[in-house]
Every structure is written in C-alpha cells, then in structure tokens.
Image: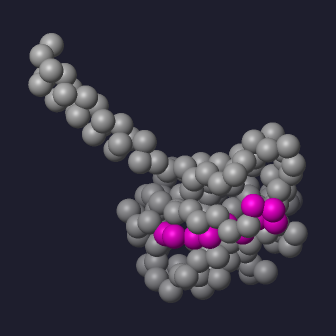
Amino acid sequence: MTNASRAAAVAVLTGFFSTVVMAHDFNVGDLTIDHPFSYATPPTAKAGAGYMTITNNGAEADRLIDVKTDFSRNAIHESNMVSGIMKMIFQAKGVEIPAGGSVTFEPGGLHVMFMDLEAPLKHGERLPATLVFDKAGDVPIVFDVSKRGADAGVGHGAHIKPE
Ligand SMILES: [Cu+2]
C-alpha cells in the first residue's frame, strides 16, 4: 500500500468510526449514561418518557434525584403492573445507582416522565437534558427521539395522573 492510499484508508476508517462512535453515551466521574432516548409522541400528547442506562463504576452509590429540561416538567417514575393495570409510581427519593452497578430506565419500568410538553416529540429530535445526581451533580446529556416501536403498548398511552 502506498502512503497515499494508506492515508486514504485511514481517513475512511476515521470517518466511519467518528460516525458510529458519535455516540451516544455520556461520562462524568464514575458514571456512564448510555443511550438516552425517547419515543416520538402523537400530536396531541402532553407527556412522553425518557430512557437510558446509568452505570456507576465507583466505590460509592450515587442517586439520580432530578432531571431538568427546557421543554417539559419532569418526574422520575416506575411503571408497575398492579392487578393487571399498569400504574406509574412517582419516585420521590429518586433512584439509587449502586456502586459497581447499573440501572436501566426502559419502557414498562423506570422512566423519566416528560410532562406538560410544549410540543410533540418528533423522530430525529435531540433533546438536551440535565441529570442531577446527589454526588456527581449536574450531568448534561441528550435524549435522541426514536420512532415508536413495536413495544408502543408499554409506553404512556394509559398514563394517568403523574404526580
Ligand atoms: Cu410516567
């Protein structure tokens, strides 16, 4: 391989990786926040939800206590099936991220509830947010808005009265 073609190959690879790795994970201190995402909402919806995985590689537990956004009022909820009905339980004390452990926010479980949306969430939008941790403090992240998938049924269609 000539130097020129080697340089070209490296350039192509670098381009490839910078696209793929553009990444959707966020690090601060011992915390990693992987793939924050949300689903597009119907035009009249006033609520949406945010999901992600938070990993704590440190020796001490931390706690997610708040999530701030410009486009909504927020709360941390956990969905739970109670007598066949999906209910949302407000997590008043936030969510502990154990030392050396991880917590996944996912449809049907823990989620960040986006309430009083100013506008529907659209596929392809990137929503800036700040996670507030007890110890790590403010961590800026971005939720990517995906298309609603086959699991739409466990989203927020039946969401009643968030606290
Ligand atoms: Cu909720």
Magenta stretch, main secondary structure, is strand
Q: Quadrant of residue 96?
A: bottom right
Q: Is residue 102 visible?
A: no
Image location of residue 137, percent across then percent down: 73, 67
Image location of residue 111, percent across then percent down: 69, 62
Instruction: Look at 74% across and 78% down and name the residue there.
Output: 162
Q: Where is 150 relative to 17, above or below? A: below
Query: In the displayed structure, does residue 50 sit left or right of residue 20?
Result: right
Judging depth in this view, the residue of 20 and 52 nearest the camera is 20
Q: Is residue 125 magenta?
A: no
Instruction: Look at 23% across and 33% down and name the residue there.
Output: 12
Q: Quadrant of residue 17?
A: top left
Colour scheme in use: one colour
Q: Is residue 134 magenta?
A: yes
Q: Where is 91 relative to 154, above or below? A: below
Start and end of the magenta stretch? 127-136
From the image, which quarter does the C terminus lie in? Answer: bottom right
